[in-house]
Image (spheres, helix red, strand yellow):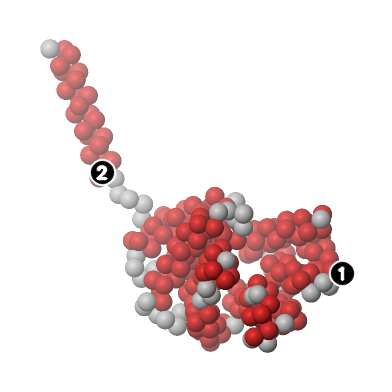
């Protein structure tokens, strides 16, 4: 009899715990956003970037009209892929498509939304690079539309990112296509200079300009930019310190070759 009582009490206790767990409220949107932001602050670690993305997506699932978390999700997807250039293409594309989805959920309601267009075109371009320029095709229409609407909103958004976007297109474009569109590497450098005019302390633009100099066989100019990156504190632009630290690391590897 005593054993029966103990067993019954255990079952009742387990049922009560299960019921309490089911009744416990899920984290509210504000709590999830706070968690996501905490992970985003540590985005120098790709695992933290991915966790932030997952949390932003959870908030988006709860709130169809929350554009801000979708912008953050699209941004996080791009940044994760940027941090993982050696990751398998399928893995990169899968994460980037999550960013595209977040941006398109905004664009379905507001096709002119500048930030949504910006990250939409950036995530799509990263997918093109992961697939291979000549294999996956290029989202040219989305790039043109995005440029128009970002330009009409804030041409300087994300440290002159529209300028650097087209500079990188020129850099990665196969030579015959560049000639077809009358692009030259000088055009890429000019565009990076415009971006640096918006924010000279955003390391990504300077690093990629140095890569364009390398492609033009202007090694002295490239080395000068890499040396600047290595000798300058990433915290010079606090809002982009993790990104700056990442590109500083890449510049160090360039100089070590």
Q: Secondary structure at mark 2?
A: helix
Placement of 103 over or under 90, stated as above or below: below
Earlier sequence position, callout 2 versus callout 1: 2
Who is closer to the viewer here, 78 or 139? 139
* Image quarter of residue 56: bottom left
From mark 2 to mark 1, how far is it between C-alphas? 64 Å
Q: Which mark is residue 176?
A: none
Q: Which residue is mark 2?
A: 22
Total marks in image = 2
Using a 10 Å C-alpha cutoff, classify the residue at mark 1 as few (fewer than 14 neighbours), some (14 to 19) or many (20 or more): few
Who is closer to the viewer here, 20 or 180? 180
Residue at left 59%, top 82%? 155
Q: Which residue is mark 1?
A: 220
Who is closer to the viewer here, 57 or 81? 81
Residue at left 52%, top 73%? 137
Residue at left 56%, top 63%? 130
7 relative position to 145: left or right = left
Which residue lies most toward the left here? 1
42 relative position to 195: left or right = left
């Amino acid at each position: 009899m005593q054993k029966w009582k103990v067993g019954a009490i255990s079952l009742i206790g387990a049922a009560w715990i299960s019921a309490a767990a089911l009744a416990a409220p899920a984290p509210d949107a504000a709590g999830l956003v706070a968690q996501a932001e905490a992970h985003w602050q540590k985005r120098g670690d790709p695992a933290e970037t991915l966790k932030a993305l997952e949390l932003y997506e959870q908030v988006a699932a709860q709130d169809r009209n929350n554009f801000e978390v979708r912008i953050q999700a699209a941004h996080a997807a791009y940044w994760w892929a940027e941090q993982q250039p050696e990751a398998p293409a399928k893995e990169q594309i899968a994460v980037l498509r999550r960013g595209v989805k977040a941006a398109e959920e905004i664009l379905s309601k507001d096709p002119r939304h500048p930030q949504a267009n910006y990250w939409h075109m950036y995530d799509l371009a990263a997918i093109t690079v992961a697939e291979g320029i000549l294999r996956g095709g290029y989202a040219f229409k989305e790039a043109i539309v995005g440029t128009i609407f970002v330009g009409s909103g804030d041409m300087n958004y994300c440290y002159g990112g529209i300028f650097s976007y087209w500079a990188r297109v020129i850099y990665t474009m196969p030579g015959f296509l560049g000639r077809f569109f009358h692009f030259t590497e000088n055009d890429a450098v000019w565009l990076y200079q415009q971006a640096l005019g918006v924010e000279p302390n955003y390391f990504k633009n300077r690093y990629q300009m140095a890569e364009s100099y390398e492609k033009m066989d202007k090694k002295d100019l490239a080395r000068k930019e890499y040396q600047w990156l290595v000798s300058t504190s990433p915290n010079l632009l606090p809002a982009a310190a993790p990104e700056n630290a990442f590109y500083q690391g890449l510049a160090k590897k360039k100089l070590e070759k």
